[in-house]
Image: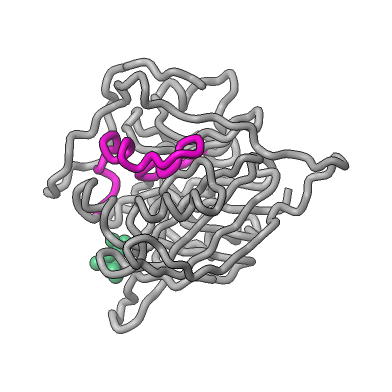
Amino acid sequence: EDVVTPYEFGKHGSPRSHRQIRDCQPIKYDNVTHHTQKAHDWDQNGRVPYPITDLNYFYDDLPFGERAPGHIVWVKSPARTVSVLEPFDSGGCTNHHRATVDTSAKQENCLVAVNAGYFNTRSGDCYGNVVSNGRLVQTNGGLQNAHFGIRADGTLVFGYLSEEDVLQKENPFVQLVGGVGWLLRDGEIYVEESRKAECGDVEESGTVDAFFDMLSARVAVGSDDEGNLVIAAIDGQSKVRGVSMSSFASWLLSHGVKNAINLDGGGSATYVINGTIANNPSDHCRDSAFRCPRQVSTIVCVHEP
Ligand code: M6P
């Protein structure tokens, strides 16, 4: 596992809001780094298996009496079958595009797709480091938010990355996207450690503590022991229904997930199977009596190898 060395705070574009937030720090703790894992790859016959091995719809009892419907999917050969895609099309982040997940999923005929990175809901700016199919879209100057990535050699990466990590050329990231909150680190719940480390600039629902503790729709990308990618999306509505970060982490762990990063959730949470929205997004339509899928920034797409 790499050790991240301290470095200077980089400039970043995210505007400070009036919200009470803690100061966003660059990575400075030698013990807070990232976890790398070899991705599952070819099967015994040397073939790339069909990527999706399981697909569940669940309605579970969660701690604290929470109940929430959602989806979880295990993805084989993720280094060949998973892409981070910009909103609407390539160049979407630079052009401040936003699009519903089902629209963005058309770019690569995604078998499964979820919303991914956080974004500025007013300007449409994508937040975080973004690498899409080997193209570096943007960096965030090392701002400390949990990221998920896939490197050129097929390793999965979870955790905090310095600017140098993001830009290194020896084994570059081919896919990379940022979230808020490192839910599981190498088989252990990492919510409380992550709560202290995360930068809250990129989520708009309040303080980091409020964001971690509220009920909400949540989306995560993670991995199991075999290096399969796991994508989970739980329905909810911020501060009303859904799951807290710690409940989400416990639930993922109970399903054999070993590493997991929390992606954008709330009204952005959208889960698409074969081009069709399969969850119940909580964002309000223009007519607030109804609910509509939100136009979001990046997505995680599972496609044929
Ligand atoms: C905005 C609107 C609402 C939404 C709310 C909370 O006010 O988009 O429809 O319910 O934000 O959104 P979120 O759950 O993503 O924080």
* Part of the protein shown in magenta: 176-204
Q: Nearer the viewer, residue 301 or 64?
A: 64
Residue 151, magenta (yes or no): no
Mark yes or no: residue 127 visible.
Answer: no
Q: Is residue 179 magenta?
A: yes
Task: Answer yes or no: is residue 117 visible.
Answer: yes
Q: Residue furthest bottom?
A: 289
Q: Residue 72's image quarter?
A: bottom right
| Residue at x 26%, y 58% (from the top left corner) | 214
289 in relation to 138, above or below: below
x%, y% of residue 55? Answer: 63, 63
* Residue under the point 57% across and 35% down: 156
Is residue 288 placed above or below 232 in the rendered structure? Answer: below
Instruction: Give the side of residue 81 with respect to residue 129, left or right.
Output: right
Q: Residue at x 60, y 61 (%)?
A: 106
Labels in figure, total:
0
Question: Residue 80: percent from the left, percent from the top?
Answer: 69, 42
Of 73 and 168, the residue lying toward us? 73
